[in-house]
Amino acid sequence: MTEPTRYADRPEWSDVLPVEQYENANPLAPIFYTNEYKDATNYFRGIIKTGEKSQRVLELTEHIIRLNPAHYTAWQYRYETLLAIDSNLEDELQLMDELAITHLKTYQVWHHRRLLMLKIRKPAAELVFIAKTFKVDAKNYHTWSYRQWLLAYFNDDELWGGELDFVEDLLYADIRNNSAWHHRFFTVFQSGVHDGEENRERVLKRELIYVKQSISLVPNNASAWNYIRGILEHHSIPYSRVTTFVQPYTLSMDEQTADLVDLDNPPPSKGAHLPCAFAIEFFADIYEAEGGDSMLKATELWKSLGNEYDIARKKYWEHRIREGLRAIQT
């Protein structure tokens, strides 16, 4: 004999008085829940009213979460129940592995893991698990946020130790993965692992070489251009410091010169789509920072972006031109 699906038909739940969701007589936007969901949540509200925390509450909340993984009250009550009955939190984490992969984009899944990890305090295995989820979606905001929280909260040198290799593998698989670029910056410049003036200089040089080589291979990659900006701003270095590198990317392939190979400033790869709008924008920002007569050069570059190289943002470039001209006149 199969067990009844509805809690209303289960003898072991007969002691619970279900509480239906309150709605006005004529709600403006009624939500048409399934009968299964209504039944489960009615009994959940009944449980909350009595304050029961037991193994069957865990079963009920799991049922509701599988029906609606964004039900934050079910998640919170489940966590309180786990603590109240002294449940094995590592077993709970294994159960969450399945739900996390199934519902990667649901914030509550990752918040629950964070609460569990505050008690379990074994973050290394979590980094391995997250790496598996990236095979499903390597750009999910909640997953990246959780990984960075783990690293920052536990702040262990061994945890940080493998992050650079990890993120390089992701960028090798997809050089345009903006989330991976952001995590590289987080790992390199916000981990505190490379403190010390000598180390900072060495890391700065390494990262500039890395991002320049990336741009050389794929010039029209917004993430890499944002990264080089981030490096310079983090170290309070003016954009003009990399003028020699940027300048060739503002030219067409026919305008490239056959100079000697400069390892510090790799040229655009053969077949690159040039001029690169990101390089032109970068050069305009250099002129804008110089001010004075250089502002006119910046406005000319913004005009070229709005009229030819970045027409999709034409209104934005027109705004930059107006602001630039206003700055000259004042």
Image (spheres, rainbow, N blue to C red):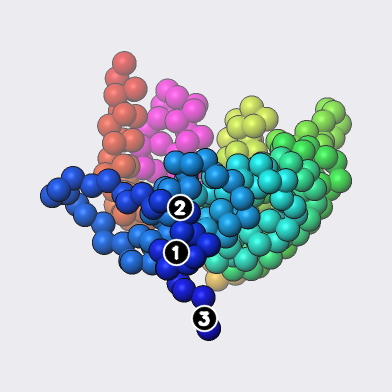
- For image coordinates 31% across by 54% down, the residue present is 312
The structure residue drawn at horizontal position 43% and vertical position 48%, both measured from the top left corner, is 46
Camera-nearest residue between 149 and 51: 51
Q: Secondary structure at mark 3?
A: loop
Which residue in the rendered view is the most extreme toward the left? 26
Q: Which three-letter amino acid code belongs to the residue tagged 2?
A: Val
- Dot 2 or dot 3, earlier in sequence: 3
Q: What is the CA distance from the residue labelled 2 to the residue labelled 1?
A: 10 Å
Q: Which mark is residue 16?
A: 2
Report x, y in % for residue 18: 39, 52
Front in this rendered view, residue 250 or 277: 277
- Residue 249 in view in this figure: no
Lateral position of residue 304 relative to residue 84, left or right: left
Tag 2, which secondary structure? loop
Q: Which residue is mark 1?
A: 7
Q: Main secondary structure of the magenta part?
A: helix
Sequence order check, earlier mark of 3 and 1: 3
Q: Which mark is residue 2?
A: 3
Residue 39, image x and y in percent? 38, 61
Residue sitting farthest toward the bottom: 1
Assign a secondary structure to mark 1.
helix
Label 3 amino acid?
Thr
Q: Residue at x 36, y 49 (%)?
A: 19
Question: Against 287, is 45 above or below?
Answer: below
Determine whether label 2 and label 1 are within 8 Å by CB.
yes
Residue segment shown in magenta? 278-302
Relative to 156, is 220 above or below? Answer: below
* Amino acid type, callout 1: Tyr
